[in-house]
Amino acid sequence: MRQKSVLDVIETRTGSPSLLRKKSNPIEIDRLVEIACNRFHAAIKTKPFFDILQGKVHEWHTVPRISKTKFGKYDLHIAPDIAWKKGRTWHLMRFSVQGVANLGDDKRLENMAMVIWATIQKGVPANAERYIVENVYWNRGEWKVWSERADMRLLEDASKMIKNDMRAMIDLHDRLGPSCDLSQIPLANNKQTCRNCGHRDTCPGGDDLFRAKLEQSALEMAKASKL
Ligand code: SF4
């Protein structure tokens, strides 16, 4: 499978040659540090960070992203970055520097998986309706907040989606075999699906879905003819 370098990925996204190809000069480094500082200061003026720093939130916790949650026979990374309590409601938030304004249904349900993490923790409500899930993300020059109250139906849908995804991944793993031949990975039916896919920079489908499908068919035919 073709693997793009990080610089290639940056250039594909920005549509222009990356300055990182040149030796960075101190002025450029100062400019990048200034951008990072601006984003940091903007972040701490955004809720919930602002409220936490002002002492307005009395109960809050950070959770390591790599902590695992038991979900049936699977270990999942579904913990929030920060959990805090306001009134009777618990908020579960993930922080993202590459967020999109309109979340698809799959991303909404992915966020609901944070409630699965919460409901098996000690000392917090087991009732889904007591949670609001949130994303703080950088978009068009500012930090934005997306939030949605959880309910039992959304939680059940999130559980079903995770189980289906895990089954599909295990099935795929079995199909790829010990050599993990990624050329057989099933590609999307529609290129719109690739637009918001996190693998579009490394998957041939993300570059040119039509060509990737032709290449995959040719590979499959070549394999079949050797059997
Ligand atoms: S980029 Fe690849 S993995 Fe992502 S949706 Fe498209 S075909 Fe599927």
Image: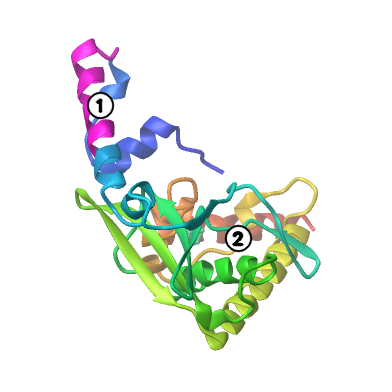
Relative to 100, residue 55 above or below = above
* Res 34 → quadrant: top left
Is residue 221 covered in magenta? no
Q: Quadrant of the N terminus?
A: top right
Q: Position of residue 80 (x, y in %)?
A: 53, 58
Query: Is residue 13 in view from this perspective?
Result: yes
Say the numbered circle drawn on residue 32: 1
Tell whether 54 sits left or right of 79: left
Q: Examine the image and state in which quarter residue 121 appears.
A: bottom right
Which region of the structure is painted magenta? Answer: 23-38
What residue lies at 37% left-to-right and 31% top-to-bottom? 7
Q: Residue at x 59, y 64 (%)?
A: 186
Q: Earlier in the sequence, mark 2 or mark 1?
A: 1
Q: Which mark is residue 78?
A: 2
Question: Around disc 1, counting alpha carbons within 10 Å, would you say few (fewer than 14), some (14 to 19), or many (20 or more)?
Answer: few
Viewer-closest of 61 and 175: 61
Place of residue 10 in the rendered image (x, y in percent of width and height, measured from the top left): 34, 37
In terms of depth relative to the viewer, which is nearer, 202 or 45? 45
Question: How many neighbours does mark 2 have within 10 angstroms: few (below 14), some (14-19), or many (20 or more)?
Answer: many
Q: Is residue 36 magenta?
A: yes
